[in-house]
Image (cartoon, helix red, strand yellow):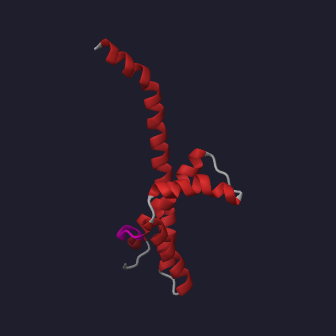
């Protein structure tokens, strides 16, 4: 039993740091994702067929690919285009893009804009 307590106590700093990163990723991606969701929902309300199609295409592409693939594309694919991101900003960007696509389809985003879905 003492060995188990020792292992837990030794792992506690790493677990607390992981919890801090989890809160950071959650808060940041929800904040930016909600802003993006409102923007995408607003774009889908425009009369321009091109803008509407681009917004629908973004949502369809994000919702149609696994989140892990999106993370890989942002972290490993963007550097081939000359855009290199550190791990934390890349993770927040990937999660925000994902959250933005899913939330843009929610009734709450449409209600914020005063429109019917």
* Magenta-drawn segment: 105-109
Is 4 one of the magenta-colored residues? no
On screen, residue 100 versus residue 76, left or right, reads left
> x and y percent of residue 28 in the render?
51, 50
* Observer-nearest of 68 and 57: 68
Residue 11 falls in which quadrant of the image?
Answer: top left
In the image, residue 62 above or below residue 53: above
| Residue depicted at 47% across the width and 81% down the height | 45
Q: Quadrant of the C terminus?
A: bottom left
> x and y percent of residue 58 in the render?
51, 71
* Observer-nearest of 86 and 30: 86
Is 108 one of the magenta-colored residues? yes
- Asked whether residue 32 appears in the rendered view, the answer is no
On screen, residue 71 versus residue 19, left or right, reads right
The residue sitting at the left extreme is: 1
> x and y percent of residue 93 in the render?
55, 55
- Asked whether residue 111 appears in the rendered view, the answer is yes
* Observer-nearest of 91 and 39: 91
Majority secondary structure of magenta residues: helix
> x and y percent of residue 85 in the render?
64, 50
In the image, residue 23 above or below residue 56: above
Number of marks in picture: 0
On screen, residue 1 versus residue 49, left or right, reads left
| Residue depicted at 68% across the width and 57% down the height | 80
Q: Quadrant of the N terminus?
A: top left
| Residue depicted at 46% across the width and 73% down the height | 41
The residue sitting at the right extreme is: 82
| Residue depicted at 71% across the width and 57% down the height | 82
In the image, residue 33 above or below residue 43: above
């Amino acid at each position: 039993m003492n060995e188990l307590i020792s292992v837990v106590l030794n792992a506690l700093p790493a677990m607390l740091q992981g919890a801090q990163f989890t809160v950071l990723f959650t808060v940041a991606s929800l904040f930016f994702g909600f802003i993006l969701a409102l923007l995408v929902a607003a774009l889908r309300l425009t009369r321009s067929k091109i803008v509407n199609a681009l917004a629908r295409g973004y949502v369809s592409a994000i919702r149609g690919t696994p989140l892990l693939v999106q993370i890989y594309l942002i972290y490993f694919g963007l550097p081939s285009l000359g855009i290199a991101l550190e791990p934390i900003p890349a993770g927040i960007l990937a999660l925000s893009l994902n959250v933005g696509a899913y939330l843009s389809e929610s009734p709450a985003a449409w209600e914020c804009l005063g429109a019917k879905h």
